[in-house]
Image (cartoon, rainbow, N blue to C red):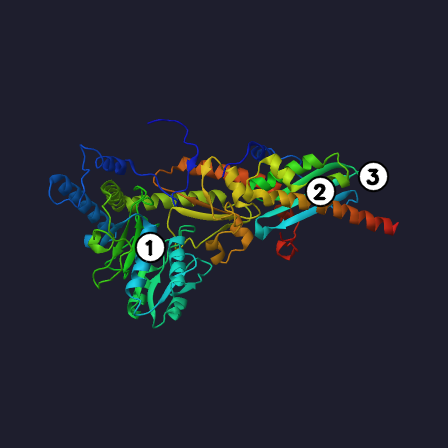
Amino acid sequence: MAYSDKVLDHYENPRNVGSFDKDDNAVGTGMVGAPACGDVMKLQIKVSDEGVIEDAKFKTYGCGSAIASSSLLTEWVKGKTLAQASEIKNTEIAEELALPPVKVHCSVLAEDAIKAAVEDYNSKKGVVAEGS
Amino acid sequence: MSNKEKVPVYLDYAATTPADPRVAEKMMACLTMDGDFGNPASRSHVFGWKADEDVKQAREYVAALVNADPREIVWTSGATESDNLAIKGVAHFYQKKGKHIITCKTEHKAVLDTCRQLEREGYEVTYLEVENSGLLDMKALEDAIRDDTILISIMHVNNETGVVQDVAAIGELARSKGVVFHCDAAQSAGKVEIDLEKMKVDLMSFSGHKTYGPKGIGALYVRRKPRIRIEAQMHGGGHERGMRSGTLAVHQIVGMGEAFRIAKEEMADESARLLALRERLLNGFSDMEEIYVNGDLSHHVPGILNISFNFVEGESLIMALKDIAVSSGSACTSASLEPSYVLRALGREDELAHSSIRFSLGRFTTEADVDYTIELVRQKVEKLRELSPLWEMYKDGVDLSKVQWAAH
């Protein structure tokens, strides 16, 4: 299969690979996909008190398009508010990376990952707020 | 000799082999006006006679490799056609005797899809499981045979794993039960010894291009004693004793003949050399964590090594290995997202099936190619594992089978 130059670039030089402490209250973690399906994405965001995503990291098990989708996503979410980040659509990712139809599910997974990370962060804040 | 860099390194000989230069040379002498371009069916002039001689010689070479009579060899367009001709040919000819066929889940699609077609025509097919080694359970095969069973179709060497079935034993069983036995030998001819005087195989499929011959040519062995009958699938002219009509492709046939002649001559040395190279390759990975060899190496063709690198997805690994030409057991490049049905049949979990790479070595593979491959694979697997959340969890001691995954 022919990959676009952007997929190849993200695949060969993935941005923001790594992990944050998932127990840190400023961190939201989204883990989506399943090994049996051939892809698992872990996206983590570090959020400021003002609700802005200051940093993001990812790890992905999956094909080149899945790795590129998550790498691109970490670049896009930095500096965005949680609300803005939640609005990122898989179609924008698929378009930016010129994903072929059989790989569109990789961008869907990326969208699911950021939504899950935001949700995780929000639920932590909820728990902390109740406890304090 | 040219010293240009041989990148990418070709390690996909199980998909196809390059034609041996000796084969290509023979083929070129059968195409042009100054060569043997005639139609072997032309009985009235020397052009036809010469072409017929060439075909006769090639038929002898193919028969000799498998210890058969040249009259038992029927030319086809390839192993897929041979499988179709054998299975449909027997099913249609013997349908009054019964309509039950036995095959196995790890067969090539040329066999499985042909059986599916026969099911649509009203036949009944049993698809046997294999053991985790990849080998067929002989007891299960025996139990599956019924009064109305007319055909058993089991491959010799599996194309994904390289596992060799005990064809001699299957032949004995089939003969004792009076069931016709077809064997797809596309991956085994010239790699594993085949002696059809001894093995009770009734029909055997061969391919030209898996054995350093050209693509577009194959053969079907059809036993004469006891005589096996098949119904033709291609009509018109009655070539090949009425079993497969169509003007013979002389250059292709000559190419396959030469390829099989060379295979007979060089098989012993080549197998030993390939086995040493495969062991070198496997040794190069042996100290890596979480790697799994697919298929039982003690019943195995020398040139194939199928390994799962756990926690790394096969397609991304193949992408990283762009300087070596290998294939993934995983079929996830298609829209299906389904991992290899062959590895699944061996009892491999989906994630290991998704993480598999088939290395297949051949005549032109060198030690330097293998060493380069080891270094590249090690480096890329390490890089992809750094990227893999599954590897991270494994390293943290998480039991991945206990994780509740969000399926999508």
Which of these two is toward me, A69 or B48?
A: B48
Q: Helix or strand or loop: what does disc 1 sit on?
A: helix
Q: Given the image, on which type of amino acid does mark 3 rest?
A: Asp
Q: Nearer the viewer, mark 3 or mark 1?
A: 1
Do the residues at discs 3 and 1 belong to one chain? no
Q: Is residue B15 above or below residue B1?
A: below
User: Could you tell me which chain the residue with mark 3 belongs to?
Assistant: A
B310 up-or-down from B94: above or below: above
Percent across and percent down for residue A125 are: 82, 47
Residue A44 disc label: 2
Residues B18 and B193: in front is B18
SS at badge 2:
strand
Q: The residue under label 1 is which amino acid type?
A: Asp
Q: Mark 2, mark 1: which one is toward the viewer?
A: 1
Residue at left 21%, top 37%?
Answer: B30
Chain ID for label 1?
Answer: B
**Disc sitting over residue A49 in the figure:** 3
